[in-house]
Amino acid sequence: MTETARIGLLGKGTVGGAFYELLRERADYVASVSGKRPEIAGVLRRSEGDFEEILAASDIVVELMGGTDPAREYVLRALGSGKHVVTANKQLLAQHGDELFEAARANGVQLRFEAAVAGVVPVIRVIQESLAATEITKVFGIVNGTTNFILTEMARTGATFEEVLQRAQELGYAEADPSDDVGGADAAAKMAILARLAFHTPVGLSDVSYEGITDIRPEDLAYAKQFGLSLKLLGVAELRDGGLSVRVFPCFLYSGHPLAPVEGPFNAVMVEAPAITEITMSGPGAGGVETATAVLGDVVSILSGEAPVHQATRRLEIVRDVASSFYLHLEVADRPGVLAAVADVLGRNDVSVRSVVQHGQGDEARLVMVMHECPESRFYAALRELEDLDFLRGTPRAIRVIEEEFV
């Protein structure tokens, strides 16, 4: 007779509701592959359920509430009671990962979170299990489907950020309050999780430098096409100068980069290591059914057997000043000596120009440049000098460029 596995569900919103239905649909299959048939022991939401009763009745607790309060308390209580936990809560893990992983280890239970990063793309499982013995040097990718959709549509249609954001909300790709997505905080939380796993070191949200896409303009995308560039919001975690750099920023990629063709609400994550060169994983990064599928996969993994709980084995210093290439957009007065003056400022700060294009005349004059890679501190020092030049007609706009093309 098949044993029953009782699942306590905390939260029944978009993802929680999708998980509830998916579990019912796939219960027989899960039983056939794991030997245990999952059943919902109780549901907790504002109008339903009691946490204490659900906790007592459950073998596994699935947390899909979002936020950190009261999710943190509930997850810690579940782990402390000897219950396995599955969560899709990226902010909870990014801000309180240390105590959650310690609670799981102390109580001999599993804490799984595949759905917290890149939706249905199994990047967590690959890093934590398939590549467990691999010395990873870099993890990077597109980890927010909302911003990738917005940037794709801005490039395709020439529409403004505000216009495409509204469209994304109508299609369900963006929340009513999209600030975490478009401001970069959502991607930053995901990169904190990936960095912690890949490099076996404590990484919190405060260790991640992040920027969003709210200042991107259609003309930046139009000019970039002339250089063969496409724009993405990229998350990067990499070993640098004996330490660890974890960042999220909008950047241009050349057409030969594997992430350049990734468009719409899709995610893609690349892992680099000497032993494997590089691998790329991609797929849908958002959506209730997609995320619920990843959650159910974690439930099946728990039912099928034990797995190691993440443990930090070293502490790496966070590196803030790294080398980058930049796109630079300057609105300038149309008069002799402008380009020479700009080149002088860049040269004195050891910033080398890769390519330059001049557009328009008179009040429409613009200089659009792409720099070679240099320490970001040097580039921003040059940018501060450029801001003081009397022929500038607006604030300079700078966007990072990834020079790797993988060709």
Image: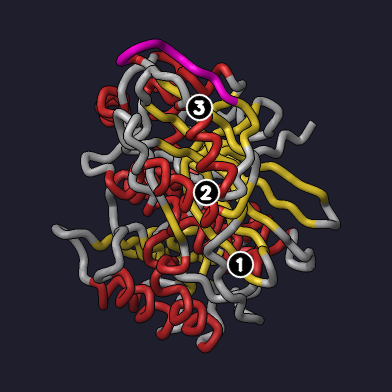
Query: On the rendered image, what quadrant is the N terminus found in?
Result: bottom right
Q: Earlier in the sequence, mark 3 or mark 1?
A: 1
The circle on residue 106 is: none
Going by the image, does 277 lie left or right of 289?
A: right
Which residue ends up furthest to the front in the rendered image?
A: 336
Residue 180 makes an appearance in the image: yes
Query: On the rendered image, what quadrant is the C terminus found in?
Result: top right
Q: Which residue is mark 3?
A: 339
Q: Judge depth for marks 3 and 1 and give the one in front.
A: 3
Q: Earlier in the sequence, mark 1 or mark 2?
A: 1
Going by the image, does 121 lie left or right of 380?
A: right
Q: Which residue is mark 1?
A: 244
Q: What amino acid is labelled 3 in the image? A: Leu
The circle on residue 379 is: 2
Q: What amino acid is labelled 2 in the image? A: Phe
Q: CA distance from mark 2 to mark 3?
A: 17 Å
Say what secondary structure mark 1 lies in. strand
Span colored in magenta: 356-363
Which residue ends up furthest to the left in the rendered image?
A: 47
What residue is rendered at 42% in x and 66% in y? 205
- The way the protein has been coloured in the rendering is secondary structure
61 to 293, vertically: above or below: below
- Are there few (<14), some (14-19), or many (20+) residues within 10 Å of tag 3? some
What residue is rendered at 41% in x and 11% in y? 360
Q: Judge depth for marks 2 and 3 and give the one in front.
A: 3
